[in-house]
Image (spheres, helix red, strand yellow):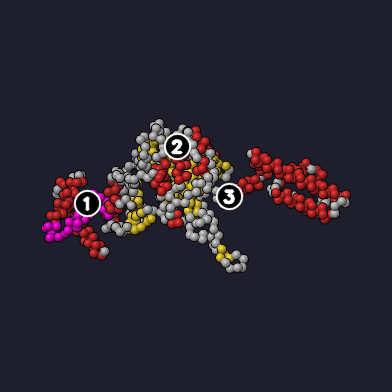
Amino acid sequence: MEAAARQGRDLGKLANEFRDRLALIRDVGLTTGDTLAFSRAVRTHLDRFLSDDGINLTSQEKSALADIILRAAVGYGPLDGLLHDRSVSEIMVNGPDQVFIERRGVLTKADVRFEDENQLLETIRRMVATTGRHIDGLNPMVDARLPDGSRVNAIIRPAAIHGAALTIRKFKDAVLGMEDLTREGSLSPAMAEFLQAAVLGRMNILVSGGTGSGKTTTLNVIARFIPHNQRVITIEDAAELQIDHPHVIALEHRPPNVEGKGELTIRQLLRNSLRMRPDRILVGEVRGAEALDMLQAMNTGHDGSMSTIHSNSARDALSRLETMVMMASIDIPFEAVRAQIASAVNLIVHQARMPDGRRKVAQIAEVVGYDSNGAILRDIFLLGMGTDLRLEYNATGYVPTSLDKAAFYGVQVNQDLFDPVKSRFVPAGSDSMMPVVKDPLMSGQRGGGGENVVRQVVVVPFSSDRPGVGQQQQQAHTVQSSPSQAASTMASTPEMQEEMRKLIDAARSAVADLQAAAAEHRTGRVPRGEASVVVAVSAAHRAEAFAGAREAIDRIKAEAPIWKKEIESGRGGDWVEGTLPAA
């Protein structure tokens, strides 16, 4: 191993020496723009240099020496091998001697390095030059795209304090399908079938997630379900979408030139796309004021449009969307913004990156609307952890209302997809993907026996429940917050009206028992103590069965003046302790 490393260093020194000598030679083959002619000229002169200097190298060493020189001249130096390695998905250069790569979602340090910062800067400039961009001290940051589609971000001094940094997200030439995602455990078969129905049913879908969570990959996969008789327009900051569709128009953001002119923003492209007769519009990512135009497109006859957004959860995605729409115009009322979002977005598909690097569709939720407390989301599918502490996909049992929209377009969905039992799916390798350790909660002691007790729970890291309070607690809080509001809420549906009638009947029955017991007590037929017991048992039983009937009881008080008079006058107050509680 040491010999190989020493040989590599020797070849590097020899390559630097021969590269300087090649720069002094006048040869048409070295100055032409033809890569093949340049390669032939370099190899010819290398053979002559080796012969003149009396250096004997094997054919393998000669080839390696020529490759080093060619990579430095027409390639990207030490990064060439990594760029051609299909297992590498991302390359991160923190400095000349710090090159990190990502393989299957896991970061590792690569065994390559640059000679110095100057070589790194030269590689960055060569990458940027292919796109007609420029990077220097006045413009120290740049976004570019290599000819193979890989996305490049570079930043140099003075913006980068410790020297130049380079990040490359490689372009994937192999397009994944829904079967590939299901086989890898990125989602369940029920989720895959539902997403296919959602695309065919022209639901507007927002794919959310963090950096590197697989948002673009998921958008690529679900967009393949778009029927071929529809016109699709894609708009991206850097072209990454690879949609297998015969009728696609791809538009790409163009940054300003050196003079700061000629920029084409996502918002300009989105507005222009509305004049291109699109059936669907796919925005690679919304990150600014273009969010308003995307919502307008979704609300003006372009059903089935899709986009991605950075967020930590489905609920956070809507919050970010509200903020970005407000960035477009401060004159739009907040209520109008929320109304636009509720009308435009049907589904949110949230992506997550697990600790072992695998990407998962962690949540599919429907946007129902908004109320005074914020967005109303209903989870359809969730990634959680079962009682056996293995990751699994589950349906919540909620049937989305947007299926009516899909039915309008002739798409029927099997109701079994939403059955929590039938749709449960444990992906392969779920043990290795656990987001928490075994025994997630602290062990304790039960009583004084000293035996350890481990609480096993079902963990759902992604949920649309509002922060800090469950839905049932929210409803209870809403009912108790205002008596008048509670009355209107309780009677808003036939089921609630029936419950109200039961509460009133129960209160009436309790009052009748009180009156009968009081009458018997006055006539002396029932001893004072027994009457108290009868009243207490009857009232407590009915109060326990219909707790929270304060308003119903108030109504009964108004209809029972005799009982009300007894209570308010204080007569019998020493035995009415068993009457119905206040609430």
Q: Determine crowd level at label 3: few under 14, some 14-19, many 20+ residues with C-alpha closer than 10 A.
A: few
Towards the viewer: 448 or 69: 448
- Indicate which disc, 3 or 2, sits on the residue closer to the N terminus: 2
What stretch of residues is rendered in magenta?
A: 50-79
Extreme-right residue of the structure: 523
- Image side of residue 195 versus residue 568, left or right: left
Identify the residue at horizontal 49%, vertical 45% (top origin): 364
- Image quarter of residue 554: top right
Select label 1 or label 2 by which is in front.
2
Identify the residue at horizontal 76%, vertical 45% (top origin): 509
Q: Is residue 458 above or below residue 376?
A: below
- Indicate which disc, 1 or 2, sits on the residue closer to the N terminus: 1
**Given the image, on which type of amino acid does mark 3 rest?**
Gly
Tell whether position 73 is magenta: yes
Q: Does the residue at mark 3 contact the one at mark 2 (Cβ under 8 Å)?
A: no
Q: Does the residue at mark 1 contact the one at mark 3 (Cβ under 8 Å)?
A: no
- Which image quarter holds the N terminus? bottom left
Res. 200 mark = 2
The residue that disc 3 covers is 470
Tell whether position 75 is magenta: yes
Identify the residue at horizontal 47%, vertical 49% (top origin): 425
- Image side of residue 455 versus residue 159, left or right: right
The residue that disc 1 covers is 70
**Given the image, on which type of amino acid does mark 2 rest?**
Leu
Find numbered disc 3 in the image and state the secondary structure of the residue it sits on. Answer: loop
**Given the image, on which type of amino acid does mark 1 rest?**
Leu
